[in-house]
Amino acid sequence: MDIERHPSPRRTVAILSRGDAAARRDATSKNGRFVDVFDALATVGVEGRPAIYDESFADAVREQLLAVDGVLVWVNPIQDGRNRAGLDALLRDVAAQGVWVSAHPDVILKMGTKEVLYRTRSMGWGSDTALYQTAAAMRAELPARLAAGPRVIKRNRGNGGQGVWKVEKLPASSMIKVLDATKDTPEDLTLDDFLRRCAEYFESGSVIDQAFQPRLSEGVVRCYMAGDRCAGFGHHKVKALVDSPAARSEAGPRLYCSNADPRFQRLRRLMEDEWTPQLISLLEIAGGDLPAIWDADFMLGPVQADGTDSYVLGEINVSSVHPYPSEAPMEIARRVADRLQLKL
């Protein structure tokens, strides 16, 4: 007797980003920022569908997400004065009903906030890092740390340098010099004046205090990861928190390269073989729940005894990683296909 065979249904993934009603109406897989991801998904047999989100039509987005197998999310934690509180609640809801969400809001809270710098400070990428849960704790502890050298203060959730400051004690003075990462010129303030500027950060979380890395002016290396595999690198000289006019003049755009670039093979091995396994163990993240795309920013630390550079983690980006190396969309698509296979 012949057995009727039915083809496996094609898996579907929504690509979610923020936009208004017009952007939602006009969105297709052939326009916008993520055409390369849609094309890569099609290559591995996954249908991508655009999903534009705004709080004003959240219910319609929810229904759209409940009709797909998974969703890839590109929404900043803070954008145009809005946060992700409503979106994260929506994503938790659809995930609870069986939709795979990358990155899940609970995973973002574990690895995509500045608190990860404190929680992983004992790892090979760690540095002298403190965490303040209250403004009072920051007021009590920061002066002693400043006496040992410049510090970098970071609000727990933010992007684009928002809420990031270089702080240092001025010699023979009770004043401190502060440099906002989004500004070009430092200011001299009293500690109390600076604490007042940081007060709002404690309304939605903690504040991280990290030792300033003197080699920051040499550039930042961004390692792009698709799950637990490296998807390429970016490198650029930065202006943010760099005092020297000469060093600031060398700042330029991020230059992207593949995961095979010989300059970064040691970092790749560290990320794939040591640090990512340690990260998911320390933070209790299931390997399959690692984001389909995330990145880690590294500053150069002290030169080691064997002459190699050490790396110091500056932040992990999970919420909205874009742009990325040209090889990344295919790596994303492979991770998506692997993850959706688990749902069969």
Image: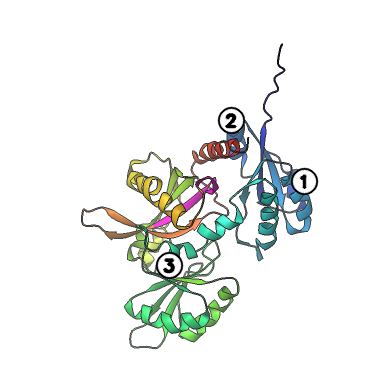
Label 1 residue SS: helix
The answer to whether residue 252 shows anywhere in this view is: no
**Position of 170 compared to 105: left or right?**
left
Query: Between marks 3 and 2, how big is the CA–CA gap?
Result: 42 Å
Task: Check the picture and name the quadrant holding the N terminus.
Answer: top right
Position of residue 37 measured from the top left corner of the image (x, y, whole percent): 59, 39
Viewer-nearest residue: 248 or 276: 276
**Position of 159 compared to 233: left or right?**
right
Query: What mark, if any, has residue 25 been given in the picture?
Result: 1
Position of residue 72 measured from the top left corner of the image (x, y, whole percent): 62, 46
User: Dot 3, how many residues are within 10 Å of its Cα: few (below 14), some (14-19), or many (20+)?
Assistant: many
**Position of 40 compared to 64: left or right?**
left
Segment tinted magenta in the rendering:
287-298
* Residue where numbered disc 2 is placed: 43
Label 2 residue SS: helix
Sequence-first tag of 3 and 2: 2
* Residue where numbered disc 3 is placed: 241
The answer to whether residue 306 shows anywhere in this view is: yes
Looking at the image, which residue sits at the far front?
A: 1
Viewer-nearest residue: 46 or 96: 96
For residue 99, above or below residue 210 = above
Question: What amino acid is found at the position of numbered circle 2 in the picture?
Answer: Thr
Sequence-first tag of 3 and 1: 1
Task: Check the picture and name the quadrant holding the C terminus.
Answer: top right
Question: What amino acid is found at the position of numbered circle 1 in the picture?
Answer: Arg
- Count the numbered circles shown: 3
The answer to the question of whether label 3 and label 1 lie on touching residues, with beta carbons closer than 8 A, is no
Query: What mark, if any, has residue 192 been given in the picture?
Result: none
